[in-house]
Image (cartoon, rainbow, N blue to C red):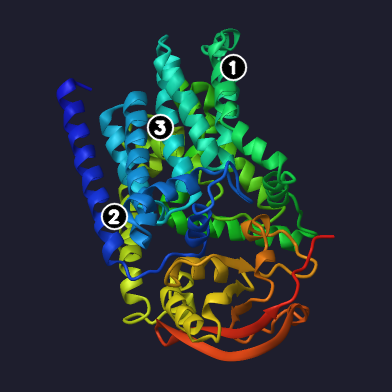
Amino acid sequence: MTNIQSDFWTRRALILLAAISLWRLLYLFIVPLDLGPDEAYYWDWSRQLAFGYFSKPPLIAWVNALTTTIFGVSAVAVRLPAVLLGAAGLWGLFLAARRLFSAEVGFWTLVVWLATPAAAALGLIMATDVLMICCWCLALWTLWQSLENDGTSWKLATTLLIGLGTLGKQMMLVFPLLMLIFLLGSPQDRPQLKRPWPWLVVLGGLLFLLPPLWWNSHHDWITFRHTAHNIGGSNPNLLARLATFSEFVGSQLGLLSPLSWLLLIGLLFSLLFSLRQQSRKVRFLLCFSLIGLSGFFLMSFKKSINPNWPAVFYPAAMILLAAWGRSAISAGRFDRLRRFFAPAWKFGLLLLLIGYCLPFVSQTVLNLGRKDPTWRIRGWQAAGQQTGELLRQQPRPDHTFILGTSRNHSAESAFYVPGNPRTYRWAGDPPSVASQYEVWSPPLDKFGWDALIITDGGNQLPGTLAQHFEKLIPLGTKEMKTGGGLQRKLDYYRGENLLSWPQKR
């Protein structure tokens, strides 16, 4: 490709990236969706900064603390990093595709990646995947540059990105492992293993884990035990295994759009079957996509897989899909399906547009009810305002704390109740550590206080909760409209005079 052509496609990529980033920024101000329970939960972490947390490394809390300190506590401030980091990750993806193939392939990589519902969510919802995928995409670029250049700057950049990504989410630890697998399996690159830089990159990236390791050593290694719990487990019979596998496939079809995902999976396995005829760059991208995706395919027969878990393995796969779609690589007989490349990204674009419109029409024009995927993040602001009003009406509002029976109640109340009060979660008697709220100190300084207790409408309070108060008074059910004739119902109680708090056994 000539420099003129490269500049042309690079300009188009920059225009596309600027347009989608500006649109996402505008969307933050106009979308009628509240902060989701996970977003509120991670924000609550940012009020007690630490080197580690119950389920994740600390970077998301640090980022939330930075943006809300600068811009104030609001849903826009919490979600702003998703837009900025999403743009940075997209630019890294383009640079990787341009370096591996061409600027044209880089542009079309952005198109096929953006034309998916998953990309829309990653650019708007503040989750740990946002941090990790940003670092992953940039690290793909810097690692390939490291393989092509003898300079140390690219290797240092790769080390930094691995480290930061690891502070974002544990899955980033797979990146250096895949790097070593590629170097070992590539005859041209295998001699690099005799040089110090690959091992220094791995070691340097792992050094970023020292703060979370130190924190975990003082908290019973809770993050490791939680992660092991997520990985463990197995389905008891064939029907259960087929059910979780089908569930996994269905979730991926929905996140990436059906036609694009089917083309992508077919392409990856077609390239695998012709691996000896494929170039070094194709093998590099297969290493960072197919190995991880195959692992989740196999794992899905054992247990349910969260739809977002394999997300980091799609950027490299999208580069391959764009390169194949633009005839930069061949997949043998699978090339006969290349005519479906354009319909695939166009259909994905249609789903993307529907996804952006869904929050505005799903509860009015379409009236999807509980089938609306955005229902889970509706009604929380109204619930917070209602909780705040009830708190002010209590006999001793200055000596009343908020107690949720679930993590969602505690996190959303902390964010949306006026004044952002410290909230607590009832974890049972004896308490089971199932969230960060149990890692933090319990309300032992609140003996003699009252509690405003929140539970989902229609759910009974845990039987032993009342024993820890002098008296328990029902305050009724409050209903918050979420659109489409649906309501979020919460039951409230006042626990008078906290007498004791469950202790671990």
Q: Earlier in the sequence, mark 1 or mark 3?
A: 3
Residue drawn where x is 21% and y is 27% of the image: 6
Q: CA distance from mark 2 to mark 3?
A: 21 Å
Above or below, 363 relative to 270: below
Based on the displayed image, in which of its 4 quarters is residue 467 positioned? bottom right
Residue pointed to by mark 1:
199
Residue 289 seen in the current view: no
CB atoms of marks 1 and 3 within 8 Å: no
Residue pointed to by mark 2:
24
Residue drawn where x is 26% and y is 33% of the image: 104
Based on the displayed image, in which of its 4 quarters is residue 468 positioned? bottom right
Expressed as whole percent of the image width and height from the top left, the position of residue 297 reads 62, 47
Residue pointed to by mark 3:
138
User: Would residue 161 appear left or right of 462 to someone viewing this image?
Assistant: left
Residue 146 seen in the current view: yes
Quick one: SS at disc 2? Answer: helix
Q: CA distance from mark 1 to mark 3?
A: 19 Å
Q: CA distance from mark 1 to mark 2?
A: 39 Å
Residue in the foreground of this view, choosing between 225 and 495: 495
Based on the displayed image, in which of its 4 quarters is residue 89 positioned? top left
Quick one: SS at disc 1? Answer: helix
Q: Circle 3: is it few (<14), some (14-19), or many (20+) Cα within 10 Å? A: many
Q: Point out the image quarter for the N terminus.
A: top left
Expressed as whole percent of the image width and height from the top left, the position of residue 485 reads 42, 88
User: Would residue 130 appear left or right of 11 to someone viewing this image?
Assistant: right
